[in-house]
Image: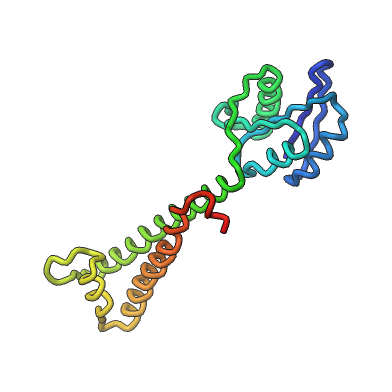
Amino acid sequence: MKSVQSKKETGDVKRATLSADPKQAIEWIQSLRFPLPMHTVYESGPTGFILARALIDAGIECVVCATSKLPACKDRKKMIVLMLNGLRGCLMQGSVHEVRIPSRQEESLRDLSRLRNETTRDLTRAKLRVSSFLLLRNIKAPGKMKRWSVRWREWAEKLGSNQPLDAYVFSDKLAEVYRVEERLLLLTPRSKRPLSQTQS
């Protein structure tokens, strides 16, 4: 993690390369002994809001800047310099495009919602693999059964093959659909609980 601190009154700039551990960042900031109150800002991204919460808990004001509002650059090294200077300038001018820092409960609920969406996509892919296998083998359900209906599932479960390996492959693909459906069924009630109940 690249970090830069600037003293507003003198323009004094301090730079450091830190780990992702919030404790190290807090210790470094406090070691600078800049006059209070100290204001910090960082780019929103994969590290989430753990650092922001840790800084605020340590009595250091912190805002998180929207990544989309920072200057773009293909060169990674130049991009880091532009980002740090841009964040520092925006913070000193009070023009940071701030991202709201969610509570821990809100973040947990968001992660649960993302897990449900990921599982829904897994189910779509699993069903597609079953359909693709049937298409490759030119196997069609009799009549006008709606795919994935109760009747269609009963037909699919009884589907045999002259090739034992084909039967095994299809059975495994169908079982995967059922496994993902079960996971999704377990996740849905949790994702619909009131926020106050998600931590129980």
Would residue 148 be visible to someone looking at this image? yes
Residue at the spot x=52%, y=47% of the render?
Answer: 110
Horizontally, is 195 left or right of 192 in the view? Answer: right
Q: Quadrant of residue 31?
A: top right
Residue 162 in the image: x percent, y percent? Answer: 25, 83
The number of numbered badges drawn on the structure is 0
How are the residues colored?
rainbow
Q: Compared with residue 182, is residue 91 higher up or lower down, i.e. above or below?
A: above
Extreme residue toward the left, this view? 143
Residue 117: % across, % down: 43, 52
Is 137 left, or right, of 97 in this rendering?
left
* In this rendering, position of residue 34 left or right of residue 94: right
Picture layout, residue 160 above or below residue 175:
below
Q: Position of residue 130 (x, y in %)?
A: 31, 67
For the N terminus, give its image quadrant. top right
User: Which image quadrant: the C terminus?
Assistant: bottom right
Quarter of the view holding residue 160: bottom left
Q: Can you see residue 73?
A: no
**Residue at (29, 82) in percent of width and height:** 163
Q: Is residue 67 left or right of residue 175?
A: right
At x 62%, y 43%, the residue is 48
Please tell me which residue lies in front, 101 or 163. 101
Residue 81 x/y as whole percent: 70, 28
